[in-house]
Amino acid sequence: RSITPSQDDRALGYFMSSYIPASPFYYLSEVYKTTTPIAQDAVSSTILAASLASLSLHVGSSKLMENARMHYSEALAQTNAALASPNTAILDRTLISVLTLGLFEAIAFSSRRSPQSWTTHTLGAVQLIRLRGTKQLKTSLGTRLFLQTCNNIRSSCIARSTPLPNEFVYFCEQAKPFLDHSIPNARLGPLMDNIVSLRVQLTAKHIGTHQIPTLIHETLQLDKQVLALMDMLPDSWRYGAMPQHRIPSWAYQGLAHTYADHRISRHWNTLRQTRLFANEVVWHLAAHVAWAKQHPELCLYIKDFDAEALQATAEANRTQVIGNIFASVPHFLGEEGTAFGPAARFLIWPLTIVAERKLTPEPARRYATWCLYEIAR
């Protein structure tokens, strides 16, 4: 018998050791261990599809991706069958299959989904967690899956600047007494709800000057909420200064932070992205205040605001946040300390946000762009 691992085994090994640990799917390795080789269900099919897709991108193999899509088709049929039965639709393994199918689609389909597709996915996820009820929160895994699904729903609404579905808001209120609010990810929910609300208001066709004070207040409160969440993180989630001898020569302004693991670093950067968003909004709203003060008929609404002070504070906060995002970059270097490990993909979104913001100082924009190219190598 050959001792050479099969293509599927290599893909699973890469996926479980390199792709999963820093992601919200860190529970998959334990779940997969409980799957017997004889009983191949939707979970094993979706995990294999995602494993092959991730390895395909890593090694640049179209043949691997073809194989991944074949398993994806099988997994889709198995998951739909599980969802069709009231007895199996409420199982953890069914929700895991749904979430992992979403991960496969994110890996394998380079073209962006249409808004209609996002809406369908979001409403489907809402119906599934409602069907599972509050019983899903009685186990550690059930709670993880619930929080991950809620995060996906909220992220979808943030990306599309659409309100949260009423059914989702209502069920989250029902679930509150059953959640352990010392869990950092559980605390993210109300923050994300406020981001959704603010984005919906900001994308209105017309924002009148009379609305500016309320928007400034809400945005400043959002920034304070993020700072409070940072302060509430447990000691084990705190980051420290990287020892001087380990700091790479290219570290931004010579600063580098260390974290207990990649997921903690990712959580911090999620909070920092929110602060970037909030302070950019404040800066633009303050610019509107400065403009309105030149028009006597509008001064009544914004006379209590100091546009210059608001913008100066927003710029100082932005500089600090960008510096901390950049200081997290060396943490994602591989063991040799010379190249980025697979988990560095979680830097792509915060670095892209920094690079694309119009208000980002040019040196910071160039550094973020350089990091993105290095991660892609």
Image: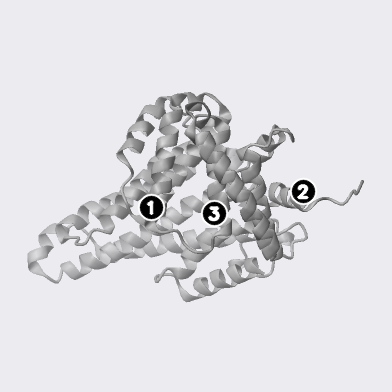
In the displayed structure, does residue 231 sit left or right of residue 298? right
**Picture quadrant where residue 287 is located:** bottom left
Q: Nearer the viewer, residue 301 or 160?
A: 160
Which residue has dot 3 on it? 105
Question: Percent from the top left, x then y, of residue 48?
Answer: 67, 47
The numbered disc on residue 31 is none
How far apart marks 2 and 1 lie (CA) works out to: 37 Å
Figure disc tally: 3
Q: Is residue 335 above or below residue 139?
A: below
Residue type marked 2:
Asp
Q: Residues within 10 Å of mark 3 (few under 14, many from 20)?
A: some
The scheme the figure's colours follow is one colour
Q: Residues within 10 Å of mark 1 (few under 14, many from 20)?
A: many
Image depth: mark 2 or mark 1 in front: 2
Residue type marked 1:
Ile
**Which residue is located at x 45 percent, y 72 percent?**
361
Q: Classify the position of the C terminus by image quarter.
A: bottom right
Which residue has dot 2 on it? 9
Question: Percent from the top left, x then y, of residue 196?
Answer: 34, 49
**Which residue is located at x 16 percent, y 60 percent?**
208
- Residue 241 visible in the shown view: no
Which residue has dot 1 on it? 158
Q: Is residue 285 above or below residue 33?
A: below
Element assignment for label 1: helix
Element assignment for label 3: helix
Question: Percent from the top left, x then y, of residue 36?
Answer: 73, 32
